[in-house]
Image (cartoon, rainbow, N blue to C red):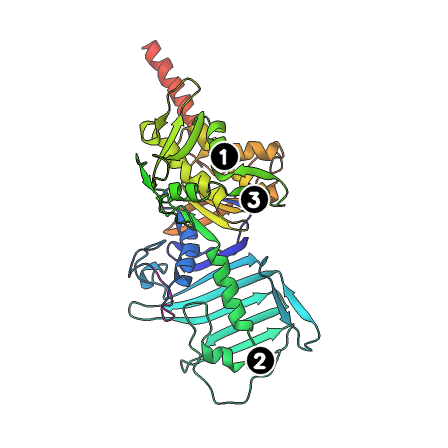
Amino acid sequence: MFKQISMTNFKSWRETGRVRMAPLTGLFGANSSGKSSLLQMLLLLKQTAESSDPNLVLKTGSLQEGYVNLGTAHEITHGAATKMSLGIAWEVNEPSISIPSVDEDSSVSVGELDFKTEIHAEEQRIFVESLKYSSGADFSAILARQPNNHYTIRVLVEGKEPRRPQSRPRVYMKPTKCYGFSYEAVDFYRDTGYLRLLEFMLEWKLSQLYYLGPLREYPRRQYTWGGERPSNVGLKGELVVPALIAGKNQKVYDSDRKTKLNGLQSRVAQWLVELDLAFDFKVQPLYSGSNLYNVKLRRNQTSPEVLITDVGIGVSQILPVLVLCYYVPEGSTIILEQPELHLHPLVQAGLADVFIDVIKRRNVQIVVESHSEHLLRRLQLRLAQEEIVPEDTALYFCQMHDGESLLTELNVDMFGNIRNWPKDFFGDLAGDVVATFDAGLARQSS
């Protein structure tokens, strides 16, 4: 699970500080307040890690499409700044790290890793100033750029170098991408796979990050499936039906692996029923052996069975959200942008129950960016009902002030009360009600 993120001089953020993340992390606020930028930083790192070019410091999307398209590195620095820093911290579960200690008779277990990269970005120049991996006082690996354009490397385990570097001339240690160590840097410590292991752990964690964008595809009357098993539902939900078909017999379990939650399709159908979007739901081939499939449902018990294209748009918009939540492997992190789009307020509120079920029963972290008051209000209710504890949530309000994004963590107590509710958080609904009443009285008396 991601535990923290941090950014300096990234887009509208001059400084975020260390932003705590929880099993369920929610970002709320007005349009263009910086919410999406917090998510884009994670997606930028993921996109960079998946690039095949080791010389590409940041894959911003300027060369081809990806999770994000941010232009050039120079364009994403805040204001007139030429340096930015990106940082993440995460729990290390499987595979875990055990670093041999200095005496080599014991080892240091690493349960949480912290990564930070500092990048120099001008219009025609981009390079890494430094990168650092650390785990408290137990372990650190630092690569830093020197004035002569060379880089130095230092690894410390419990405050000491695990093995002294061999005496040799200074070598060129330019990092790979914004987070990796070159062969020369690795070879500088002759013993070891420490540095390669750190790279692997970062790439492993980013590979467990899944994203669904706010603009999801419209439903189709027919879908083609050729037997493939997609790793996700697509950035716009375009792979949701192939994922449903491929995972038809995939059993969904509690995180303790003891309790079945039924098959993937059954679990999705159950939620559609609970959210009052369908009475039943199924994906089936046009005929036996066909690679063409229909998605059909009934709105209520007396309704005829129809294609998904012949009902309201809400079903097709929430379907990728539900499938992704129960399709990804346990231990994954899901980023959802505005999952409430095109959904009735009651269904928006129900999304909170979906997310709570997923984080509690599947050990999947959810990071959601939303404008939905109904979703937040349902979370408050479930906190008051002890369906979820405050420690399992991290809820934030983003706002823009003097051209700079600012972040406020909402102080939610065990009774679901937000003690630092920002002014006009979701507009002035109460004020509108009073104004409507006053206007009605004025018209009646005129």
User: Which is closer to the viewer, label 2 or label 1?
Assistant: 1
* Residue 237 % position (x, y): 37, 43
**Dots 2 and 3: beta carbons under 8 Å?**
no
| Secondary element at image label 1 | helix
**Amino acid under label 3?**
Arg
Magenta residues: mostly which secondary structure?
A: loop
Judge the density around disc 1: few (<14), some (14-19), many (≥20) Cα neighbours within 10 Å. Answer: some
Say if the magenta span includes residue 190: no
Where residue 65 appears, as percent x and y from the top left, is 30, 55
- Circle 2/circle 1 CB separation < 8 Å: no
Q: Is residue 383 visible?
A: yes
Residue indicated by mark 3:
362
Left/right of residue 280 with respect to residue 74 in the rendered view: right
Cα separation between marks 2 and 1: 51 Å
Residue lying at the far front of the rendered structure: 288
Residue 152 seen by the camera: no
Q: Residue at x 56, y 44 (%)?
A: 362
Residue range highlighted in magenta? 53-60
Q: Quick check: is 55 in the magenta stretch?
A: yes
Residue ID for mark 2: 191
